[in-house]
Image: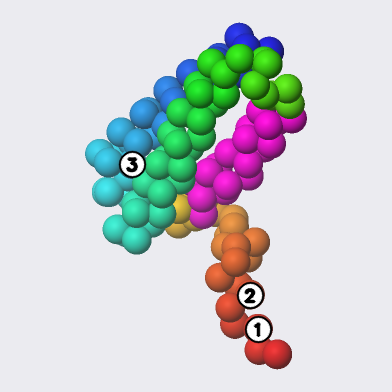
């Protein structure tokens, strides 16, 4: 399990660096500044989770026995949170309007 967690941490970290570079240099010409800031938020949280996975892999099994469930929750969280932020930030470039799935839609509902 330790190798799997380290490999995932490396993959998430590498993707965060690549996507962060894309957001800092290539994205500014394609979308507005608010969407760039949103994209950078997704990158930042993905990197935080990559660091967390590194720490999780390095912890001894005697201290923490539920590494697998924590690992799965973190991976699912990164995919659901960061990758959905990337899609929402790039919404202007994609033909489908993904903002209908976002939380902003529920701000207009009055009770």
Instruction: Choose mark 2 or mark 3, whichever is in front.
Output: 2
Is residue 74 at least partly visible in the picture? yes
- Residue farthest to the bottom? 111
Residue at the spot x=58%, y=78% of the render?
Answer: 107
Q: Which residue is mark 1?
A: 109
State whether residue 25 is above or below residue 59. below
Q: Which residues are magenta?
A: 69-88
The answer to which of 66 and 35 lies nearer the viewer is 66
> Quick check: is 58 in the magenta stretch?
no
Are the residues at dot 1 and dot 2 in contact (C-beta closer than 8 Å)?
A: yes
Place of residue 65 in the rendered image (x, y in percent of width and height, measured from the top left)? 73, 22
The CA span between labels 1 and 2 is: 5 Å
> Quick check: is 77 in the magenta stretch?
yes
Q: Point out the image quarter for the C terminus.
A: bottom right
Residue at the spot x=59%, y=57% of the render?
Answer: 98
Quadrant of the rendered image containing residue 34: bottom left
| Sequence-first tag of 3 and 1 | 3
Q: Which residue is mark 2?
A: 106
**Secondary structure type for disc 1:** loop
Q: Which residue is mark 3?
A: 23
Residue at the spot x=33%, y=41% of the render?
Answer: 23
Q: In the picture provided, is 88 more to the left or to the right than 18? A: right
């Amino acid at each position: 399990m330790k190798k799997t967690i380290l490999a995932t941490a490396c993959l998430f970290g590498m993707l965060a660096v690549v996507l962060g570079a894309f957001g800092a240099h290539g994205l500014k010409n394609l979308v507005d500044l608010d969407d760039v800031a949103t994209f950078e938020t997704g990158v930042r949280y993905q990197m935080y989770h990559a660091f967390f996975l590194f720490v999780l892999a390095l912890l001894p099994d005697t201290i923490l026995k539920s590494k697998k469930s924590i690992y799965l929750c973190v991976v699912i969280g990164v995919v659901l949170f960061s990758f959905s932020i990337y899609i929402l930030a790039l919404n202007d470039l994609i033909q489908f309007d993904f903002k209908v799935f976002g939380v902003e839609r529920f701000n207009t509902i009055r009770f």
